[in-house]
Amino acid sequence: MERDKNDLFAYRWGERFFKNPKTLFIVRSVALGVFVYALAYGFVHPKASENHFTTAVFWSFFWPFFMFISLPTLGAYFCSVCPLAFVGKKIIKRKGKAFKMPKVLKNPYISLGVVLGVYWGLFYAFPAVFAEPVAVAFFYTFFTLLAFLFYFLFKDMSYCAHICPISAIRNAFSRISFMWLGSYRSACDTCTTFECAKVCEFGQSPFNFDKNNSMGDCTLCMDCANACAAISYKSKGFGFSLSQPIRRARAVDVWTYLLLFAFMTLTMKLTTNFNHSDFAAWLPWMWISKWLKGVSPHSPLNFEAVLTLLVSVSFTLYVVYMGFKKAEEKLGIDRKTLFTEVGYAYAPLALVSSIGVAITSFFTRYFHNVVNGFIEAFHLPFGFIDPLVSPDAGWLDLFGVFDFIAVAWTLLLLSRRIDLISEGKPYEAKRKAFWWLALLPVSYLLLCFL
């Protein structure tokens, strides 16, 4: 079968790196080794003064940098090399009878709630606690044991698909990626065996990905690609699926975009542009924070961060509510349909704007944290290195361009997705609906100038 030029499997290097079982086994084994060692090191060396490795692996590599760089480029490759999924597939293949996961546990909002409440919420509320290696080790050990419990109890990769904190982010943000797992229609039309679907531990049907304009719960494990030669892994352009009709659009994806924008992007922007500004003393949430610190001076709770987060979430929800309410009035389309169909346009606002922060942090924190952590943990014959650049370096401001890219892309997608569901509606109605729905990105753009 002749492959398209934009299919990475058409090239030996692409097939060898992304598809070859031996290569994937090596990468996953290394990831598992680092993961286990980082956990063990955190328990053996519980204090931050003696352990830079555990926090560097989880806070400076796995979560922020790898997640926010790999998702918008390769898609769910992070899940493909995940240590827990690697072990989980071995458990599933060797265990006996298993239960079908209860429907109540398949609610996609569980994963979203876990990543927002258990991860971001705790991280904002108790940053000093999670700066300690032993706390990080306990945190990830809890999720490791929870994952193994689900692997033993339930069929298929139920934990990865429905409970893992990353699953909500993976499904929503993989649409930003320019890489897409699909299949060659000419081969699928005559297929009678459906090998790609049979080998999938997530119950997915890769032959339908292109038709549905959705990869569902795909983690790019590449089992289907090794079972069927008709599977492709193509470069199609950043976020190409966001400008097209989505057959199985989900409200949870839109909520993921909006809430992660509030929890990550907007909260960090308020913290840097407002909380540390000359007029910080005039901000209501800073007044309350100062008062609470006076009332509870020894509390481990970071009042400033929690209140800033509450302001961000409240502002986002109010602006979005007003936007969709007014758009419903202008277009005469029910709010639920508008939210589910048009809401995908907010994807760049949540993720692309965070890329600049991730890259800046790479130069100022992540790189030297990770390098020094490995030097310490593996007793390498090198001295600790300093940050690549100072946080005050002026050229780091260049990465602020990602904020403007995110806003511009969001506005373009809003216009496109409004057109997709409002065919035949008056231009004036669509124009007014657009600007109401553009309140969130435009408001964020104004904050970027302050």
Image (cartoon, rainbow, N blue to C red):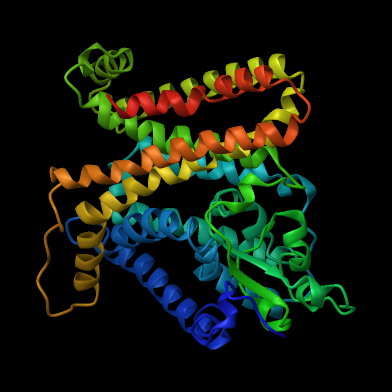
Q: Is residue 178 above or below residue 104?
A: below
Image location of residue 4, percent across then percent down:
63, 76
Left/right of residue 245 with respect to residue 179 in the rendered view: right
Q: Quadrant of residue 212?
A: bottom right
Could you tell me how many numbered marks the image carries?
A: 0
Image point (69%, 33%), residue name: 419
For this view, does 118 lie left or right of residue 219?
left
Q: Relative to 15, is 32 above or below? A: above
Q: Nearer the viewer, residue 337 or 262?
A: 337
The residue at 47%/36% (across/down) is: 261
Q: Quadrant of the C terminus?
A: top left
Quarter in which the N terminus is drawn: bottom right
Q: Quadrant of residue 294?
A: top left
Tell which of 42 and 14 is nearer to you.
14
Figure check: 94 above or below 38: below
Residue at 21% in and 46% down: 396
Regarding residue 353, the answer to whether it shows in the image is: yes
What x and y, as percent, mark residue 331? 72, 20
Question: At 41% from the left edge and 57% from the top edge, which residue is drawn?
Answer: 69
Q: Position of residue 20 (x, y in %)?
A: 56, 85
- Residue 117: tell me if it is visible: no
Relative to residue 76, is residue 34 drawn left or right? Answer: left
Query: Percent position (x, y) of residue 380?
Result: 17, 79
